[in-house]
């Protein structure tokens, strides 16, 4: 009973924080779009947005199947519904962060953005780690349960998580491959950095233009 209660608390914490971050991401995205339009900042867009939209329906479909397989056990159903998504998020986030780190460094030559991407990655992986910890804590409770087909629940849920890990890696690779867009584009900090890049380029262009005029004026005086 204690293990089950602790597992539920960990899961509720995991779900609650993810919901909070989802709201924050949506708010940040809206703020980023507004800032981008106001400052007229161009950020390389994800060239495979249409393909990326498949991620959510896939994990929901697999999660529902997993929950159905472990029906009549509420704790097992919650774990089964979230397992595939949790594993997929781990590998997908890692691949996205590696892709954006390389691409942003190429675009901006600014190492600060790498720290931002790294921080976002660590936060995401920490949240997904809560799911794994909750699963380990729940082992004694879930090990006594079986799926509708008679398979041990913990083995089934672990299999879903590993399947999600593989799926996230393949999916992330497909999105990142030959993609010149920023995949973690919802962070307002990225908008600010590209705005700084744009301002720097404008300043350098203005200085270069001024130098040209000064040189031209100097040649005129020599005459």
Image (cartoon, grey):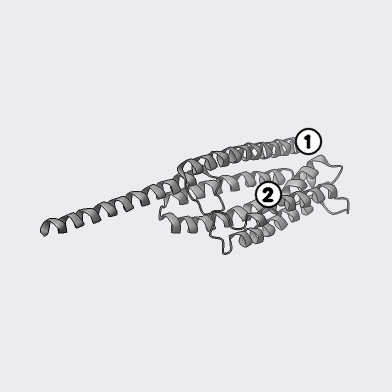
Q: Nearer the viewer, mark 1 or mark 2?
A: 2
Q: Is residue 51 left or right of residue 185?
A: right
Q: Quadrant of the N terminus?
A: top right
- Judging depth in this view, the residue of 133 and 196 nearest the camera is 196
Tell me: 184 left or right of 138: left
Viewer-side residue, 13 vs 96: 96
Pick the residue in front: 219 or 203: 219
Q: Helix, strand, or loop for circle 2?
A: helix
Q: Which residue is mark 1?
A: 1
Structural crowding at the residue carrying mark 2, measured as other residues with C-alpha within 10 Å and reported as few (<14), some (14–19) or many (≥20): many
Q: Is residue 124 visible?
A: yes
Q: How many marks?
A: 2
Which of 196 and 130 lies nearest the eye of the viewer? 196
Identify the residue shown where x is 54% and y is 42%. 33
> Please, which residue is most extreme toward the bottom here?
178
Q: Is residue 141 visible?
A: no
Taking the view exactly as shown, the residue that stands out farthest to the left is 222
Task: Indicate the position of residue 18 as horizontal and vertical percent values.
Answer: 64, 40
Disc 1 secondary structure class: loop
* Residue depicted at x 74% and y 35%: 5
Question: Residue under circle 2?
Answer: 86
Q: Tell me which label, 1 or 2, sits earlier in the chain.
A: 1
Give the position of the C terminus as an image quadrant.
Answer: bottom left
Q: Is residue 108 above or below residue 13?
A: below
- Measuring from the top left, give residue 130's x and y in whole percent: 65, 43
Q: Which mark is residue 99?
A: none
Mark 1–mark 2 Cα distance, whole angstroms, equals 25 Å
Q: Residue at x 77, y 44 (%)?
A: 140
x%, y% of residue 150? 88, 53
Query: Which residue is located at x 42 percent, y 54 percent?
Result: 108
Side of 8 relative to 116 (left or right): right
Q: Quadrant of residue 165?
A: bottom right
């Amino acid at each position: 009973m204690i293990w089950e209660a602790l597992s539920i608390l960990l899961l509720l914490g995991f779900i609650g924080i993810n919901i909070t971050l989802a709201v924050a991401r949506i708010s940040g995205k809206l703020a980023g779009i507004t800032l981008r339009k106001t400052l007229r900042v161009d950020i390389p867009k994800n060239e495979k947005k249409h393909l990326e939209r498949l991620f959510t329906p896939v994990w929901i479909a697999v999660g529902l199947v997993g929950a159905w397989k472990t029906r009549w056990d509420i704790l097992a159903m919650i774990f089964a519904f979230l397992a595939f998504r949790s594993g997929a998020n781990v590998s997908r986030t890692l691949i996205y962060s590696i892709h954006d780190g390389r691409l942003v460094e190429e675009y901006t030559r600014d190492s600060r953005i790498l720290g931002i991407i790294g921080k976002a990655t660590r936060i995401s992986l920490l949240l997904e780690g809560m799911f794994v910890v909750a699963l380990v804590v729940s082992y004694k409770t879930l090990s006594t349960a079986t799926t509708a087909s008679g398979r041990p629940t913990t083995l089934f849920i672990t299999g879903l998580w590993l399947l999600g890990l593989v799926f996230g890696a393949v999916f992330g690779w497909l999105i990142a491959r030959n993609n010149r867009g920023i995949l973690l584009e919802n962070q307002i900090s990225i908008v600010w950095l590209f705005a700084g890049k744009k301002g720097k380029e404008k300043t350098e262009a203005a200085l270069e233009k001024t130098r040209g005029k000064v040189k031209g004026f100097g040649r005129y005086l020599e005459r």
